[in-house]
Structures are given as C-alpha cells and as structure tokens.
Amino acid sequence: MEQEGAGNTHKDLDQNRAPIYEALERFRKMRVVPFDVPGHKRGRGNPELTQFLGEQCVGVDVNSMKPLDNLCHPISVIREAEQLAAEAFGAAHAFLMVGGTTSSVQSMVLTACKRGDEIILPRNVHRSVINALVLCGAVPVYVNPDVDKRLGISLGMKREQVAKAIAEHPNAVAILVNNPTYYGVCSDLKAIVEMAHDAGMLCLADEAHGTHFYFGDDLPVSAMAAGADMAAVSMHKSGGSLTQSSFLLAGPNVQEGYVRQIINLTQTTSGSYLLMSSLDISRRNLALRGREVFRHVCELAEYARDEVNQIGGYYAFGRELINGDSVFDFDPVKLSIHTLDIGLAGIEVYDTLRDDYDIQIEFGDLGNILAYLSIGDRWQEVERLVSALAEIRRRYQKDPSGMLTQEYIDPEVVASPQEAFYADKISLPLMETTGRICSEFVMCYPPGIPILAPGERITPDILKYINYAKIKGCNMTGPADPDIKYLNVLK
C-alpha cells in the first residue's frame, strides 16, 4: 500500500509531554456539569464503585468531547499522543488501541488481508490471529515451527521454511511473525522482512510480548527497526499501562487512513480515557526511562535464571538456545522454566505457587512455566519465587517417566478457518471425533495458542493431549461446551 500524503515526520515532538493526561487534568479543573455518558456522572451515581476505584479514577472516566478528542477520528490530543508514540517506537504511525492486543493483531491482519487472500504464518500463533482469519476469510499458509524436543516448545520459523512457503504461494499477501514467542524465542525478523518485501508481501509482527524490544540496548530487534510493515504491541504486558491497552504500529508503506478505517470496524466508539491516558503516561515513562528500566529487568531475569538453575531439576533456559535460525535470538527478560525433570507438569507448579505460596506467575503448560518479569518487579520478589521453587522441588518431586512433553502438534488443515467456523456442524462426544474436522477452537489459556483451530482434522494425538491437559488442570477454553466433553465438528 502506498503511504498517504507526505507521511508523519514526528518533528518537534517533546517526549516529556502526555497530551491525553494533560487534557484530562485540565478537564478535571473545569468542573463541567455532566449531562452525557457515562451514567455514573463522575462516580456520584455509583458510590460503591467510587469507593472501590477512587474519585480520581472515576472522575476521568468520561466520554469523548471536543476538549478530549475522539479515538475514532483523532485530531487533537489523541492525535498528538499517537504521534509521540510513533516517534518513541520508531514507527511512521501509531494507533491507540483499547481492545487489547487482540484488537491490534486483528486490525493488522484485516488491513493486510481480504477474503481468499493467503497469509504465511507459524501455526503457534495466538488465537487472535486465527480469529482474524475467521472474520476476513483469508487462508492460512502454515509454516510448522521446529520443536525443541527436550523442552517440548515450538521455536521460530526457519528462513528456508519461509522461503519455501513464499515460493509455493507467490500470491500470498503477507507474512506474520511472532516477535517473540510466549517463551522468548525470536525468528530472524530482518531476513523475513527482506524476503517478504522482495516477494511484494507485507511483513506483520505480533509483538504482544516484545514491547521492551524498543527500549533496550541488548535486546532482540524490534519489528519497526527490522523494517516490518505493522506490529501489534502489548503495552500493558511489559510496558506498564493498564490491562487491555495496546499500540498498533505501522511503517511508511502502510496507508494510515485505511488502517484507521479497519480499526473502526471493530473497535468501540466509546474509547476508555483511563486506558488511553495509561498508554500516554506509560509511553512517556518508557521514552524517558525505558532503557534504564529494562536494563534492570534484564539483570533481574539473568539473576533469577542462574538461581533457578542452581536448584537442580529445573531448567531456566535462555540465550544458550540460540542457533542462528529457528532460535535466531532470545528475549533475556523472559524467565521460562522447564519443570518436567522434577516430575511435575508446568501447570502443576503454576497451581502450587499460587495456592501454597501466594505467587501468581503468568502461565504453566504441560512442561514449562513462565514468570513474567517487567518494570514493576523487585529483587525481593524474585528471591521469594526462587525460594518457593526450591521448596516445591523438595516437597513434591516425582518420577518424570510417562509424562507428556510435546507442546506443539502439527495440524492437518482441511478447510479455511472462516469456512469451518460458519459451516453446518454437529456436536459429538470428544472421544468420538477422531478423523472429523473441527469447527471451533480448543486451547489452554494462557498462552492462548490453539491446540485445535476451525478447519483442522482431529487426530488421536490431539485428543490424547486435550485429555492429558484437562487431567493436569490446564485452563481449557474455546469450545461451545465449557466442560469440553463435546466438540462441534463439520457435518
């Protein structure tokens, strides 16, 4: 797509400013009488909510108006905030997103793809990517990632796999890359961007877990620095903003006005000023102090990795996995820990940390856990986590034989996600679905990577995995049947 107009040069921008926050502070002092929504009227109509959240919070939970701009068509303070974000992240354009990074990912895919278009992507994507294909009717061309057999985790896309997919599908419109995966694995993003552009395709990056890449001296390359065309950035994960707030970034070859139109197809017309101001303030914080902050986070993570590996039994993996291709780089902030050698599934360690030690980590799967370190962590919390893991090993270690290790099963794609999702279907008992075509999602959440997606054939290995994950206590989501005793399959 051609760039619209002269482009955004971001000249004379002051990263000390936070335009949305400043406008809300001015508005607070105006003492305006509200005869608009929201109906709680600055908290007066809902005293219990006001007591819980505080007057300062509900007092700026307001509706769009001229002094505060409008997220659907920003021309003043929101526009300024987006320009500041674009400059801070090295993008041509940035969009404030209040539907989480799910909305950023979906807007990115919907911008690049329409019905019938092919898009090259790894299968270990977040469900939001495949949801976008359900919405727009694009067809996935999966690059099955390599798997680390010891850890049971999927890795990045190999360059030769991407080149092969491009050669076999020259009419594909885009390539999507995880930067990084949930576990911290990065593909060779610069090389994939170059391959995509040489083939006339866009390169899209799901950077839900890579916000800090833009503010680090010794971190993997960010999507914008690598020349990607669009990136979905989860500011609320490692960037410090409120949950559900995100940025969608775009490069100079993407038409800003068209992206805005795509966003407005699904994003609310009542954008939360709590979320937008948190993005504004958090962007300012990272622009001014991000490098120092994430240097400290990297130190915390390296210390934690060393301490966990000294316990014995656990394996906190890191940059030693780098092989120059399927693990081109590794995010040192990620504290990913393999647990199977102590005879416990990751989800069992996850549950024990929460239930017995009051420690909530990000997720546990069948073989690993992820403790998410970011700008709010301190040394004492890391020490507490390490001590708890040592005690769990001492108290609960078992014989690991017979445990499942594989986190990723190659799918057999029979129909497009949209075709399968909307097709005529029947509900069958789970164990009677072997060989049928699934019409819904099945996944452990987190991380939200589908075990089954619409249009994929159900195999005995997949059913074994689902049953094992249920027994171990994984939080299974996706199907219409909440107990996952039945699955919807194509007639």
Image: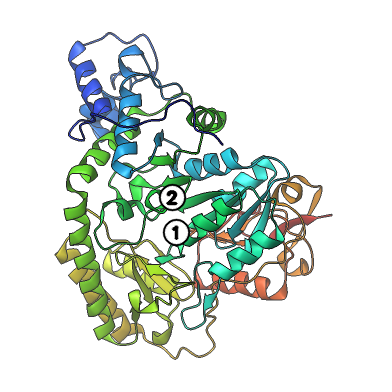
Q: Position of residue 101 (x, y in %)?
A: 45, 45
Q: Nearer the viewer, residue 45 or 478?
A: 478
Quadrant housing the N terminus: top right
Task: State how far apart marks 1 and 2 are (Cα).
Answer: 7 Å
Report which quarter residue 311 is drawn in.
bottom left
Above or below residue 338? Residue 226 is above
Report which quarter residue 250 is drawn in.
top left
- Classify mark 1: residues with Cα within 10 Å, few (<14), some (14-19) or many (20+): some
Left or right of residue 404, residue 62 in this image: left
Q: Which colour assignment does the render follow? A: rainbow
Left or right of residue 392, residue 407 in this image: right
Does the rendering let one see residue 318? no
Q: Position of residue 76 (x, y in %)?
A: 33, 19
> Which residue in the structure is indicated by mark 1?
190
Left or right of residue 165, residue 154 in this image: left
Badge 1 element: helix
Left or right of residue 435, residue 102 in this image: left
- Count the numbered circles shown: 2
Does the rendering let one see residue 192? yes
Q: Residue at x 50, y 67 (%)?
A: 156
> Which residue in the structure is indicated by mark 2?
227
Report which quarter residue 80 is drawn in.
top left
Mark with earlier residue (1, 2)? 1
Q: Residue at x 27, y 75 (%)?
A: 305
Q: Amino acid at mark 2?
A: Gly
- Residue at the far right: name it: 491
Quadrant housing the C terminus: bottom right
Determine whether label 1 and label 2 are within 8 Å by CB.
yes
Q: Position of residue 258 (x, y in %)?
A: 54, 29
Q: Residue at x 52, y 84 (%)?
A: 403
Badge 2 element: loop
